[in-house]
Image: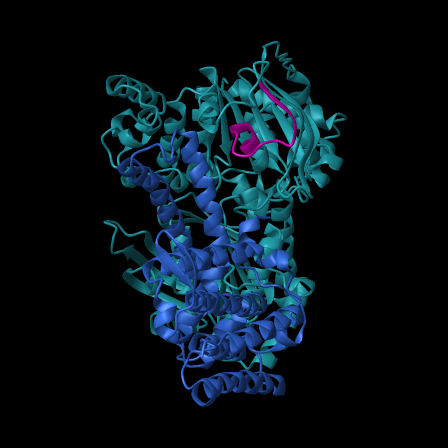
Chain colours: A cyan, B blue
Amino acid sequence: MLMNSKPIIEFTNFTFQYFSQAQPTLHDINLKIYTGQKILIVGPSGSGKSTLGHCLNGLIPFSYKGEVHGSLKINGRETSTLDIFKLSKTIGTVLQDSDAQFVGLTVGEDIAFALENDNIPTDEMHQRVRSVAQMVDMHNWLTSSPFELSGGQKQRTSLAGVMIDDVDILLFDEPLANLDPATGKIAIEIIDDIHKQSGKTILIIEHRLEDVLHRDVDRVIVINDGRIIADMDAHSLVASVVLQETGIREPLYVTALKYAGVQVTEAMQAGYIETLKSELSRDALQIWYRRIQPTRQLNTRLSILNMENISFSYDGLRPVLEDINFDIKEGEMVSIVGKNGAGKSTLSKLLCGFEREDHGRILYRGEDIRTKSIKERAEIIGLVMQNPNQMISKPLIFDEVALGLRLRQVPEEKITARVEKVLKVCGLAPFIEWPISALSYGQKKRVTIASILVLDPKILILDEPTAGQDYRHYTEIMEFLVEINKLGVTIILITHDMHLMLEYTPRAIVLADGRKIADTTAAEVLTDAKVIVEANLKETSLFALSQMADVEDGTQFVQSFIDYERRLKNR
Amino acid sequence: MNMKMKLFSYNLADTFIHRLSGLTKLICFLFLTFAVMYSYDIRVILVVMVFSILLMRTAQIQFSQVRLMVIYVLIFIFTNAVISFFFSPEFGTSIYGTSHEFASVFGISLTFEQLFYQVTKIFKYASVIPLGMIFLLTTNPSEFASSLNGIRVNYKAAVAVALTLRYFPDIQRDYKDIYLAQQARGLELSRKAKFIDRFKNSLLIVIPLIFSTLDRVEVISNAMDLRGFSKSKTRTWYMSRNFSRQDALALVVSGLIFIATVFVSIFINHSRFYNPFI
């Protein structure tokens, strides 16, 4: 690849330490990025990858203070001589929460925000907004408010809002968080198209490696514990041991190749599923696949939750849910998937009694729960919200978990026993006296789960339990839920995460536009092209792998992978 | 999505009134409001009221859009009327200098003067409703922010107004979600509970609301900083409108109404009150 002699970004012996931290978050970073490159920066949570982004766009030291050693040059100029405003003319940042960063009342205003701050005359502003909106295909939405937009459209708007400054570098901070799988895939395609058309330098900070590698990148930089531990192309990266060492999830098809005993090498070009030289692994995959005995798990247990012909609408005009039927058995672990706005959250609100169905019945162990109040239902069906900060209302862990019991006037001595028991189950027993503010995000999540479990519900609904979590924390939370499930609690997961669905929930219910369009195994859902399109899901790369390996039944191949993995992990 | 949001929503239409700049509408609103607040002449008040109802027609505002707000205001006006009657039932007499009693309640005599005074006052308040509605429902909040900035209000304060409107529905939704989730944990805010318990329980909603809102504030302020907010002393506005001939017309008309009101008081009534009893 042809490279300019001068890098556009250059870190030299760069070290950064937040004033609030005892240790530097970035150690001795040396990194050169050249004009027009497309770079993926991966690393687990807390590795320093977001801090690196903040150093580039000027949020450090503008909003987050700390001590800097070494040098960081952008376009040949030392960043310590530039402020956040000057930097924002060179490097545009798209933050991960495309809803919260939408500061305008309409798309047009949001895109124009940077121009407004630059005192550009109103007429010129309108022209420039129109032309940049055209680039991201939002020109017909300029007067729409954020409430009328989908997640993908909000992200396009954010992108237009930074591109309007004609920056040289675009920085994407976890662009895939909060997006459904199909929208995430499109986001990666838009970024790639913009890279190809404009030749801008692109930096993507993400931990979802496989999803970003849907389109090619020039280099992948791996950060762990504040240090750059790898800087290579995607093919070399998946062939190396770096991913396992840092706890970043490798692409699923690579895992499958390894299960089949294939030695993944650079020559196999396994960085992207499209470039994979499958002739080198075909035989091994076929042999492996034939050896796996399918597990037939027939759930003969009693049903615990039935929805019969449920319909619901908020305004009496547009139905949000239409004629939903399903039957969940005791001890099942089920995921509910579908695009944003498909009615998943509404479904959980109906189950908890937050909203009342217009038609149909909800049965718990065969008994209609229509007459039960929200409080009474909570003793059967517990709901854990996505953001733990939305639930935590007490400073101490013990008080937080005890809250539901205290509000129910349970005698204090019984409360202590029950809280201690549930904290033990949740692995929080050592922290019983701790303030919640001292906990990590994952631990806070556990506290909220504990505060629901203490009421001893038979069914637990979790809304996006692993959102924004890296692979290690994801695994921690999910393995914990498996433990809870083994204790006999039925678990319903509302999720966008296709990996979670494949690995942890044998069954998936798929909603699209308020209707149930599938209710079957995760393997079948993620290999059914029609369901995938309708529900904004994404086909698993295992399916593509099975086709490369000339396996006839792709769905069975995916199922075999799940069965193999489950046995391997002894679940 | 949510009916409550409609209390604040602005109605998209393209009428003469919508095309006026937000600043013009604010000044006209103030002129007309001062006019009816200054005058106790029911004739003047009725003229302004009929005028503003006509304006509401022009702006294509439907009664269904404003029903909720009208109900609130009417309740307020009537409560106010009843209370002020019981506090000073003689006030009308003392203003108009005569006393024509026609009935009595609980030993308090009812006079035509008092009745006339209170009816005037009710219309006075009531005539402000359509004016306020027109202003709220036809002014784009961002455009209004730009107008505020136009009259030298600090642009940061003006943006804060627009941002409040932008994030209000989000926070309202958070509040509802938190409230329901805490209810599931057993929280009750019913009137049966003691005041101190209700206060303590409401903290169970407020605290998570504050923390989740703070998360949001951090993202918003980063997003704004990264796009150069507050870098210079001035800023321009995507939504600002130029001052047009129509704006001038509206200002002149409402200014004239205000002057006419003052004129009627000084030269015809020789006081703020119109006295039909002499």
Compare residues A119 and A281 and report the one nearer the observer: A119
> Which residue is depicted at the point 58% across and 29% down?
A335
Report if residue A39 is visible in the image: no
Tell me what residue is drawn at x 37 percent, y 39 percent: A441
Query: Which residue lies most toward the bottom here?
Result: B267
Q: Could you tell whether A282 is left or right of A407 in the image?
A: right
Which residues, given as a range, are shown in magenta? Answer: A348-363
The number of discs equals 0
Q: Residue B206's image quarter?
A: top left
Q: Residue B106: x, y in percent?
A: 36, 51
Q: Nearer the viewer, residue A202 or A126?
A: A126
B30 above or below B91? below
Name the image quarter holding the N terminus of chain A: bottom right
Residue A63 at x, y = what percent?
34, 62
In this orientation, does residue A185 appear? yes
Above or below, A9 relative to A26: below
In this image, A521 relative to A110: left or right? right
The magenta stretch spans residue A44: no
Splitting the image into 4 quarters, where does residue B155 fall? bottom left
